[in-house]
Image: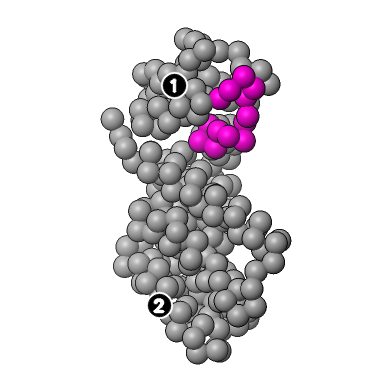
Amino acid sequence: MKRFYRNAAATPRDAGFGIALDGKPLRTPAKAALIVPGRALADAIAAEWNAQGADIAVNAMPLTRLASTAADLVAARRDAIIDEIAAYAGTDLVCYRATHPPELVKRQQIVWQPLLNWLTEYFDAPLHLATGVTPVAQPAESLAAVRAAVAAHDTMMLTALRLATAAGGSVAIGLALIAGRLDADAAFAAAELDENFQIEQWGEDPEQTKRRAGLKDDLNLAERFADLLRQKD
């Protein structure tokens, strides 16, 4: 698509901030005016549009895409999205521990256990541990508490949480990232702990490299989006 505007700028709106392209409101793919809660995110989205050249590269505007997803998809399917995210607690990555080798067992304990302790302390959502890949039933009260923790977020933050949880394979990692307890690097290290251990032993193939780069990009985007949302005006 050819660039059709000269300037993008954040504009105050009753429900927050919009983004204007030469004074006209930026709209989502579903044709709704794109409104975000605070100026920081609106300014960052406007900056994506101002950085475009003669041709608009949609892939170079991740904040715009994520905000549009929140407006067009997540807002309309909020309960289903909450259920989708909370369901990770039933088989959360950080609950499934190795029995060997000792180095991996120790690493999982050091990196993953604090996340489970945090879920217990802040959300009253203790989760059981399992060894290997054998499923373990989690307490119904804990699953309900995790769902409540997920549901406490507004639509925009819920969208960041969904991205982080899917990338990390863990609602514990997702919640910790958007709460600022983990940064994207730490979230990636936790999510890819087993994979990193195997790579240390055997090396990394090109397909792994590509997949892992995509996960890291998603975690970085979720972190940045959440950080911008926390900057309320």
Identified at 44% across, 21% down, the residue is 18
Q: Which residues are magenta?
A: 52-64
Where does residue 77 sit, x and y in percent of width and height? 58, 40
State the quadrant of the C terminus.
top left
Q: How is the image coloured?
A: one colour
Pick the residue in front: 57 or 70.
57
User: Which secondary structure, mark 2?
Assistant: helix
Q: Amino acid at mark 1?
A: Gly
**Residue that label 2 marks:** 110
Coordinates of residue 21 in the picture (x, y in percent):
51, 15
Crowd tier of the residue under label 2, counting other residues whose Cα lies within 10 Å: few below 14, some 14–19, many 20 or above: few
Image point (58%, 34%), residue name: 60
Q: Residue 177 in the image: state x and y as whole percent.
A: 42, 55
- Residue 228 lies in magenta, yes or no? no
Give the camera-side residue of 212 and 16: 212
Q: Which mark is residue 18?
A: 1
Q: Earlier in the sequence, mark 1 or mark 2?
A: 1
